[in-house]
Amino acid sequence: MNKISITKLSKEEIKERKIDQWPIWEKEISRFDWEYTTDEECLIIEGEVAVEMPEGIFNIKAGDFVTFKSGLKCIWNVKSKIRKYYNFK
């Protein structure tokens, strides 16, 4: 089972899901450990991050819609300031 899913959404899908009404999270260039205790979906508004896990490195950038599954343990390596809309499921 994939712990990370990266897709692109159309403008219509973003509007239908009301993603622009979700909270925004921001983080400066940094590197830190993270563990997901619930599923999270997010739309990257700005920036770039490499999410490192034993299965490989996932490069995520502005425009990506990402789902992180509960139980994922990873390292976030923020390459340029990240801004994202997020929603915990």
Image (cartoon, rainbow, N blue to C red):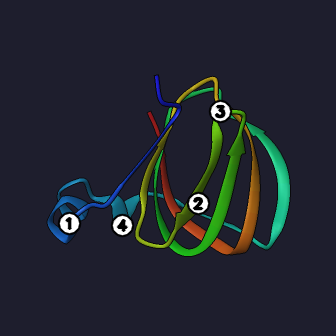
Discs 2, 4 touching: Cβ within 8 Å = no
Q: CA distance from mark 2 to mark 3?
A: 18 Å
Which residue corresponds to mark 3?
36
Q: Going from the N terminus, do you reach mark 3 or mark 4 first?
A: 4
Foreground of the two, 82 or 26: 82
Marker disc for residue 20: 4
Task: Quadrant for residue 7, please give it.
Answer: bottom left
Residue 86 placed where, x, y %?
A: 50, 53
Q: CA distance from mark 2 to mark 4?
A: 23 Å
Q: CA distance from mark 3 to mark 1?
A: 26 Å
Q: CA distance from mark 3 to mark 4?
A: 22 Å
Which residue corresponds to mark 1?
10
Q: CA distance from mark 2 to mark 1?
A: 20 Å
Residue 76 placed where, x, y %?
A: 74, 53
Q: Amino acid at mark 3?
A: Tyr
Foreground of the two, 55 or 49: 55
Horizontal side of 28 relative to 46 (left or right) equals right
Which residue corresponds to mark 2?
59
Callout 1: SS? loop
